[in-house]
Amino acid sequence: MIGFSHTLRTLPFAACLLVPGTLRADQDPAKLQEMALKIDRQVAAFYRKKSLPVPDVTDDATFLRRVFLVAVGRIPTAEEAIFFLETDDPQKREKLVEYLMKSPGYSSHMSNWVFDLLRVTDRPANGRATLEPYRDWVRTAMADNMPWDEFTRSLLASSGDGWDPESAAVGYYVRDRGMPLDNLSNTMRIFLGARMECAQCHDDPFGTTERMDFYELAAFTHGQHEMRQRYMEPLWRELSDDERRNSREYRVARLLWDKVYGLSLAGGGDGRIDLPSDYQYRDGDPGETVGARTPFGKTVRMSERDKGDDGREQLAEWLVDRTGDRFAAVIANRMWRRVMGRAFYEPVDEYRPPEKTHHPEMARLLSSLMVELKYDLRDFQHVLFLTRTFQFATNPNPSQVEGGDDFHGRKIERLSAEQIWDSLITLAAGDPDRKPVRKLEQRVMLDGKPVLVGRKTMPELSREVLALKSEQAVRDYFAKLVRQIHDDSPAQGGGAMSMMEQGRSYGGNALVRASELPSPAPRDHLLYLFGASDREVVDASSREPNVGQVLSLMNGVVQEKLVNNTDAHLYRALDGASSDAEKVRRLYITILSRPPSDEEMGWMLEELRGRGEDGCRNIVSSLVMSSEFLFLQ
């Protein structure tokens, strides 16, 4: 096994292949395989209907690279690739899928997907507060494999303290504070595949949604506000005077106003809302109060006369459980696109009833499997990875189904920005999932420095402040807090307690997973240049090429961290190589997850023998910047 035998057999993946029965205790392998077979049977029925030939199953090398990139968002390490390619086990593909689905890389890659879908940022638009606890909650939910229905309910119905892990999902609304109608239209698009944004201003000319429908739906979430912020408002106005804006008191007040009150949410949903002053239709008058009512599915209503406080809970319950198969169908279609490369039907954020799809039986099957798996997205994707359909050879031709997947082999597509970055750091530093993940910063920070270290954390501060129930209580607490910070010794910034409380953050240049880096990525970062979402709109990432991408590969991180870095992890694959041919072979497997062809071997041997170490670096540069590296087959 070309010099890696000891290292390889200590890999988690090696144990997965060598030891039978590696599925999680809560999984039934036969059940997952049976579900995968049901999908393949529907695909076979579609082939017969369309008179399509059955594609070949792809080779091991293509499958290896494909499943790594799709499941965990990176290429395999040299050790992982060599072990898989040189293992004779008829079930090694199934075992590889299991290894990946329970690895930290799965939750990291899923976090990227959810961050993009929900537009998760480190800070809200004003930049003064923080959404880090919300980001951490989303990341933890993916790591814990929270079922999608539970995840959705938590987002839509949560209230309380944003620093409390039990209610940190309030960041979903805090992220769009001041824009509740935009938040609602995004909610409908994300979870139900309903495009209602036009109905904020007028009846939708391309659909059935009327402006009244939108406002009746918006009534469920109307009435959101910060928890008990009114008790601090008089003090805040006093300290916001221009003459006091440089004082310590103002900076402490800003901390409470932005990062405590600003990250809280009260108002469970009034269930009623006033129509806007420009309302133009006969079914209502400008300024008229209307009650909450759902536009489709099983009707849920709230009174326009009596103010409620559970509108968001009722909205969440309706969305998940009272819209027929719609909720399950939308997330199943999103997962199909994530795994298969193209949605079962397109666009993925516009729901289509099964009878209006190109394969109604498949549409119904996917929805039913999602429900049967209790909205477990990891298990649902696991089933898709086990299908023969996922393993079909690459199809370079466009889909024969307009607006949908023809199930006839994966279409070639460029890697996402996150897949490119995570693959590059795998080459530069080895398995990125062995590095510590980003931790939530819980220290109280003032002017960029920790204060009250060992005495109070942000969750503790937030809990104490939000418990205050009068203006005088706020003033007394604030005066005491200012004194404590004033008396706080700079020496307290160190010590064991400081290390225990300190979060782990990473700058934009850190060689860690994209899910651990700032969100959104800085504009000069490779992630941004390759189309990572700016988190402004839903699904805003792009895979379109531009000149900046080429320059970044030629002069940026590839040259600095890979080509010219003799300590890069990829060069360790050359240790112990007995010949130039073996070096070339290892470089190909490390970078492209396959051995070179005879023709490629001849070219690379000529380069290596003619230029020595420079030739080796040239080979690395050419392979990393090749279309084969940058595209997924």
Image (cartoon, helix red, strand yellow):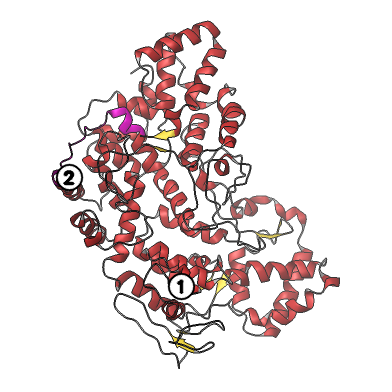
Q: Is residue 151 visible?
A: no
Q: Is residue 207 left or right of residue 434?
A: left
Q: Is residue 327 visible?
A: yes
Query: For numbered disc 1, what is the local secondary structure?
Result: helix
Q: Residue furthest top?
A: 610
Instruction: Compare residues 83 and 587 and report the one nearer the observer.
Output: 587
First-in-chain label (1 vs 2)? 2
**Where does the image place residue 36, in percent across and percent down from the top left?**
20, 47
Residue at (54, 61) in percent of width and height: 133
Question: Which portion, as a residue range, is magenta?
Answer: 46-65
> CA separation, marks 1 and 2?
39 Å
Q: Which mark is residue 42?
A: none
Residue 62 inside the magenta-drawn segment: yes
Query: Most extreme residue toward the bottom, as rendered?
Result: 305
Residue tagged 1: 199
Q: Which residue ends up furthest to the right in the rendered image?
A: 243
Q: x and y percent of residue 505 in the render?
A: 59, 48
For disc 1, the neighbor class at 10 Å (few under 14, some 14 to 19, many from 20) is many
Residue on which the image places disc 2: 50
- Dot 2 falls on a residue whose secondary structure is helix
Between residues 436 and 533, which one lies in front from this camera angle? 533
Amino acid type of the residue that numbered disc 1 sits on in the rendered structure: Ala
- The spot of residue 303 in percent (x, y) is 41, 90
**Residue drawn at the location 61% of the way across and 53% of the way down:** 502
| Residue drawn at (41%, 45%) of the image | 104
Question: x and y percent of residue 311 in the render?
Answer: 43, 80
In what quadrant of the picture does the C terminus appear? top left
Which picture quadrant has residue 64?
A: top left
